[in-house]
Amino acid sequence: MTEIVGHRGARGEVPENTLASFQHAQQLGIRQVELDLHLSADGQLIVIHDPDLRRTTGQHGRVDRWHSTDLVQLDASHCGPTHPSPCPIPTLQHLLQACEFEHWQWEVKSASRRRARRLVEEIQRLHQQYQLTGKVAITSSSRTVLRAAQQLAPEIPRGFVAERAWLNPVKVAKRYDCELLVLNWKLCTPARLRQAHAAGMQVSTWTVNQAHDMRHLADMGVDSLITDFPGLAIATLHAR
């Protein structure tokens, strides 16, 4: 059965990467979610997609220049669906304390070698603190990040985020011993899906927001689909 993964919580239904968004997904019965991580100036893992604050908060500056105590005061509902109350940026630790899911995809964007190591080390610390063995995959399109995860936290599964097929996504994922291929859904073909499964990987496709695409990918046999609209995905796949 194809699992539904809430993209940044439930990005199309509640402002993305906010506690309210993940709580909404949880209330829908979603068991798996995807989120994005950046480090604050004081080394805290912050749940936000962009490296800067403009799009989601209307504020100026890079996330890594702000202290976490200031970031969590910002309202991240400046884009996407309207919400009746402010939606602060959460730290990953706060989110882990507030929500429980069967599986998390923690995506780390491109980073320098030094920063990638810091990110992975902090992920590893929280992974151990909250006893999340078997519940987390570190995902990235960055070879630097995947290499750091492979070297520093080999016990945490990895996933290669593939947006383009100019390199064979399965071969790249195998190079970093990935257990998960996070594939742009437009690149998902029966042959590529078979190749990934034969290599022992699960395939998670993104970002799937149309009902007919959800049905098509589920029929193809993808392991999970990442969607901005988990409510629609539930109605679509559970009605099959």
Image (cartoon, grey):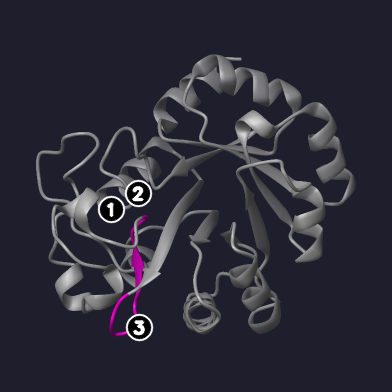
The image position of residue 118, as x and y in percent, is: 48, 83
User: How far is disc 3 from disc 2 in space, using C-alphas?
Assistant: 23 Å
The residue labelled by disc 3 is: 43
In which quadrant will I find the C terminus? top right
**Height in image: 239 above or below 52?**
above
| Amino acid at circle 2 | Phe
- Do the residues under discs 1 and 2 have CB atoms within 8 angstroms? yes
User: Callout 2 environment at 10 Å: few (<14), some (14 to 19), or many (20+)?
Assistant: many
| Residue 29 magenta-highlighted | no
The residue labelled by disc 1 is: 18
| Left or right of 74 on screen, residue 135 | right
Q: How many marks?
A: 3
Please identify the residue farthest to the front as the structure is shown: 166
Q: Quadrant of residue 144?
A: bottom right
Name the front one of labels 1 and 2: 1
| Left or right of 166 on screen, residue 110 | left
| Amino acid at circle 1 | Thr
- What range is drawn magenta here? 40-49
The residue labelled by disc 2 is: 22
User: Callout 3 environment at 10 Å: few (<14), some (14 to 19), or many (20+)?
Assistant: some
Q: Quadrant of residue 205?
A: top right
User: How far is disc 1 from disc 3 in space, using C-alphas?
Assistant: 19 Å
Return the residue nearer the eye: 17 or 1. Answer: 17
